[in-house]
Amino acid sequence: MSPHNAPLSSKDRQLVQIIDAASASAAHRSGPWLQCRLGCTQCCIGIFSITQLDAQRLRAGLDALASDAPARAAAVRRRAAESVERLTTNFPGNPATGQLDESNPRYEDFANDEPCPALDPATGACDLYAARPVTCRVFGPPIRSEDGIGVCELNFINAPTAEILAAELDTSWSPLESALNAEAEAEKHQSGSTTVAWALIKP
């Protein structure tokens, strides 16, 4: 493991377990309305923001992959570097640090066709699945935000509102995630969101 990438804390492992259990419960309640399957990669295309805690977890996951499957890890690193090279010029934020500025007008339409570097284009699988960001862990089932209940456009097609609400994801873990992310930001001396590609090339 890189000296810059500390092993995951017991609190972060606990957070992941809580989130995965909540997601599994929501998926079970979603039943046949949920179409998420291996090889469905729509949610893996396009830049999305991740926290510094997510970035820390991804780097640890990449280090673990390098020990278990060096060739796959090298491919992820290559895809991340190529992605950063393509996107640096118009990056909506600080390309030196990878910090996103989500208020930048360019952010909304930025790199919507860019595949996540963790995505294996040959298999449609995530090479860093065990270390994936929280956004990836909860995507699919209905989830509440300040804008209301949202679902992936491929799921719950023509579903009654009652069915959608019955499958809503429990996000009571959010305060724990926020606290652990604050710790990760303090450790990294960097705040704000970033992207998967930048997370994987920054020590």
Image (tube, helix red, strand yellow):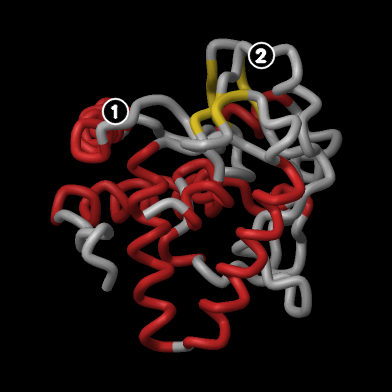
Query: In this view of the protein, which residue sits in the foreground, 63 or 166?
Result: 63
Residue occupying the point 66% across, 33% down? 163
Residue occupying the point 23% across, 33% down? 176
- The numbered mark, 1 or 2, whose residue comes first in the sequence reads 2
Which residue of the protein is positioned furthest toward the left in this rendering? 10
Work out how far the residue at label 1 is from the one at label 2, CA to CA, in angstroms: 23 Å
Q: Residues within 10 Å of mark 2 (few under 14, many from 20)?
A: few
**Residue 195: mark:** none
Residue 143 in the figure: left or right of residue 32: left
Query: In this view of the protein, which residue sits in the foreground, 15 or 105?
Result: 105
The total number of labels drawn is: 2
Amino acid type assigned to the residue bearing label 2 in the image = Asn
For numbered disc 2, what is the local secondary structure?
loop
Location of mark 2 (residue): 104
Q: Quadrant of the C terminus?
A: bottom left
Quadrant of the rendered image containing residue 122:
bottom right
Q: Residues within 10 Å of mark 1 (few under 14, many from 20)?
A: few
Tag nearer the camera, 1 or 2: 2
Residue 130 in the image, given as x and y percentages of width and height: 43, 66
Location of mark 1 (residue): 178
Q: Is residue 144 above or below residue 171?
A: above
Q: Quadrant of the N terminus?
A: bottom left
Residue 106 in the image, given as x and y percentages of width and height: 75, 19
Quadrant of the rendered image containing residue 38:
bottom right
Amino acid type assigned to the residue bearing label 1 in the image = Ser
Q: Is residue 173 above or below residue 25?
A: above
Query: In this view of the protein, which residue sits in the foreground, 110 or 168?
Result: 110
